[in-house]
Image (cartoon, helix red, strand yellow):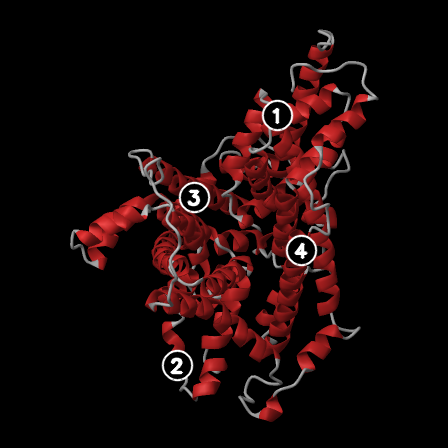
Amino acid sequence: MKISLTKRPFLTLTRGFEGLVSVVILCVLIVYPLGTLLIQTVFPHIFDYHMSWRLSFRPLQEVFQNSGNLAAVFNSLWIGVMAAIFATILGTITAFGTVFSPKGLARLIHALTWVIFFTPSYVIAQGWLILLQDGGILSQLLNLPMGWSQWFFTPMGLVMVMGLRYFPFVHFAMVQAIGHVGPELIRAARLAGAKRIRRFVSIWFPLLAPAWMAGASIAFAEGFGDFGFAAAITPQMQLPLVSYQIYSALNEAPVSYATAAGLSLLVILVTALALWLQFFLLSRRSYATVSSATRVEQESPRHVGPSGWVSLILAGLAFVMPVGATLMQSLWKTQTGGMALSNFSLDAYQSILSPRGDGLSSLVRSFLYALVAAVFTSLLALFIASQMTFNKTPAAKFANLLTMATIAVPGVVLAAGFVFAWNAIWLIPLHLVLYGTPICLALAFIAGSLPYAIRLQLGAMSQLSPNLLMAARTLGAKRLTVIWRIVLPLVRETAISTFLMTFTGTIFELPAASLLYPAGAPPFAVDIASKFNAFLWSQGAAMTIMGLIVVLGSYGFGTMLLRRGLSIHRQVPDVGAVLQSMEGRNVYSCNECG
């Protein structure tokens, strides 16, 4: 029997309502905070005690008239470009080394690259600082004179360490692209007498343009708005960067809301322009490398070549050097004691783990924040992505546009928006002033991860047939039942990955934590920063190592569950059996859904 016509309007109305709920969630978590920040570029007195809608362009004038702000924008631009170029070179080398190396070495390079990708930029930056500063690890090991590391505290030194942090974006984009270039093209060029450099310039470089453009644009966006390097290194360099200027504008006395808003608008515009330029260049020609004429050949035995060893050295250098320096620093009693055996101890760890210490409490606090953020982010991403995939309503299309538009917003900009969004005058009568509370910080953590989680879930759900969900809905299943019993088992791997991504990223999240944490209850990242700022190097390093153990341990445990299928049944659910179990509760059936 066909569906009753009286049921169709109800189903359409339900789909529209669910799409509207998704839009409301995204607006509350992302659009509203960003809007309250950016609106101050033209209405600077909207958050005054006596609110005024008087139009003024003073915030933008302050940005362009202040020499410090202009210098910060200029420095961030050219350092971001140079770091992206350096990251593209390194990512290209490691990608080729991974593809053309034996499986064992390729997996090791790939694993190191993933670890670098998951390690927060603040941790990497602080590790390089511990290693290369005067009196640091390398100075103690090699007995180097004072002043030898001045090159590190220059813009080019910053470009070097930023490139070593951002090359995974290029690496991941290029590994798959290299594998899609047909071997017949390279063989034909070799038979024609083209040397290796000529083959790279004439064949590899043009065909891989989409991959390296995508990786380079993301590396630039990360470098331009990165707060971790700005907070760790640039204060000692006296080199203003735009992300640190935003942070300083919100922490100086008096607070310069207008400056923070104007600089945030510039960051968003520059980031959007970089991503738009990538799409524009790629739309001008075709870069197709896979066609019906492409032949898949049996993989021949590979030997470790120079590119493989160089890739391993680069990946090891990018992670082992800063993290190894941090580990060694955590075991030193004093900074001046050097490499003497008597200078090594576990005092820093004992101090942090003691009941009187604040390191353990801040770690537990951030662990709870991360757990809450990961759970809610995963659930919201699952719900929003499912309705965006299967309900082609105007609200779903608008939600899709919102996630694409906000995915590249730097963390410090979104966190600055939360300062205004939940501290506004109009929230007082509603008792919704959340600024300075754990709820506000948790919402900021969720908002920062949600666009990425939604895009990942959309990729997984694009392979599911809409007929499955339509059949379940017409058999009387509620939306949550459909998601829990059909959608979640089919996309469980991506769901667990988004959970792990959010959880591990929240532990060391610095921009939101620095601007929004409740008084007297600093999260783990803020506590680490305070230790380093107070020159308690060993304690700060010990806290960093503890955090890395928690992050990598959680990621490893989650990966093990994912591979063994212990968290959710390993087998793909029998969708037919699920639908039959629902049919008994239904008053009509569906012949159109299949």
Amino acid carrying label 2: it is Gly
- Cα distance, mark 1 to mark 2? 65 Å
Residue at image mark 4: 558
Which label number is shown at residue 57?
A: none
Which residue is located at x 61 percent, y 68 percent?
A: 544
Residue at image mark 3: 271
How busy is the neighbourhood of tag 4: few (under 14 within 10 Å), some, or many (20 plus)?
A: some
Q: Are marks 2 and 4 in contact (CB under 8 Å)?
A: no
Q: Are marks 3 and 2 in contact (CB under 8 Å)?
A: no
> Quick one: quadrant of the C terminus?
top right
Quick one: SS at disc 4? helix
Amino acid carrying label 1: it is Pro
Of pointers 1 and 4, the one earlier in the residue sequence: 1
Which label number is shown at residue 466?
A: 1
- Cα distance, mark 3 to mark 2? 36 Å
Residue at image mark 2: 147
Tag nearer the camera, 3 or 1: 1
Tag nearer the camera, 1 or 4: 1
